[in-house]
Image (spheres, rainbow, N blue to C red):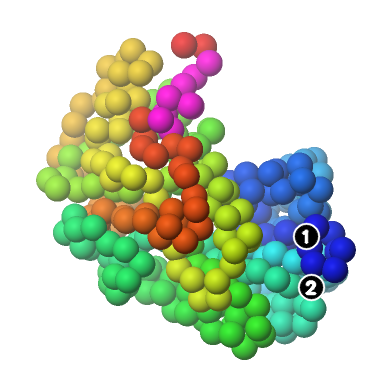
Amino acid sequence: MAGGGRVSRLFAFGLGFSAQVLGARLADRGWEVAGTARDADKIAQLREHGYAATRFAGDRDNADLPPLLAGTTHLLHSIPPGPDGDPVLNAYREEIAKLGSLEWIGYLSTVGVYGDQQGRWVDEGTPPKPNSARTEARVVAEQAWIDFGKEIGVPVQVFRLAGIYGPGRSVFDKLAAGTARRINKDGQVFSRIHVDDIATVLEASMARSRAGAIYNVADDEPAAPGDVVAHAAALIGVEPPPEVAFKDADMTPMARSFYEGSRRIGNALIKSELGVTLRYPTYREGLASLMPRDR
């Protein structure tokens, strides 16, 4: 329950993969959960799960959305900024500012804001070094939300997420679909985080919010992407795809951009300040939990 006997209510702008895991946990504890999606099919699926869901695609053309915001105690935002800035602040800044019930705001960002660190470890004190318009916009949006929180007196927390995986979104699914690849770029490592551990971090932050806090959300062991694919293949007894040199790989510009930055994401703050113990401290534990059941 929220303060004063109110029912706690989560509203997620972008009630997607990570937000739904959190929402399911909170709903089991009696919370109300509402949020948005872009597509009618996804909205229908969310409603089937008992969530109050409506459309938001960056504009103010939906009269059903403001009433769903009423009574929100915890606001989660996972929609990336667009060419004109943060879509939620652009469209619903005033409505959010007027929410007398609001206690906590969480903004889901990306470790991509650190850019290329040439494989070095980074923590929350490392200055952002965005290397694309996309990650530059993320840095701007992070600060916009922190400033907004100061303006309205509600603590805003920024969560810089590593590569997300979990049920239905893992290398096992790519192996099954024949889309897994082992792209080799010398010295390249990525950090990852299981979606369940994201929800654990968010719950911990809700319990002890700190205005303006920024948290890296990653597991303990950055690894080369090909190593993860090879490990998953070994777990299910299949041959891993052959290695392909990065320079020879046929990739979309978006996929290639992820290889333009190599960094190791330090996660000490979520442990020391939020008291988080990761359920899946490396990709090995995470993949073991996602093993296909027919194996």
| Residue 39 seen | yes
- How far across and how far down the image is residue 232, in percent? 35, 25
- How far across and how far down the image is residue 29, in percent? 77, 46
Is 152 contained in the magenta span? no
Callout 1: helix, strand or loop? strand
> What residue is pinned by disc 1?
9
Using the rendered view, name the quadrant where residue 12 is placed. bottom right
Mark 1 vs 2, N-terminal side = 1
Is 287 contained in the magenta span? yes
Q: CA distance from mark 1 to mark 2?
A: 9 Å
Q: Are marks 1 and 2 in contact (CB under 8 Å)?
A: yes
Using the rendered view, name the quadrant where residue 129 is placed. bottom left
Label 1 crowd bin: few (<14), some (14–19), many (20+), radius 10 Å:
many
Q: Residue at x 79, y 52 (%)?
A: 31
Q: Residue at x 65, y 78 (%)?
A: 154
Please determine whether, in this image, residue 166 is positioned above or below residue 95: above
- How far across and how far down the image is residue 235, in percent? 35, 18
The span shown in magenta is 285-293
Q: Residue at x 72, y 82 (%)?
A: 97
Amino acid under label 1? Arg
- How far across and how far down the image is residue 54, in percent? 77, 58
Numbered mark located on residue 101 in the image: 2
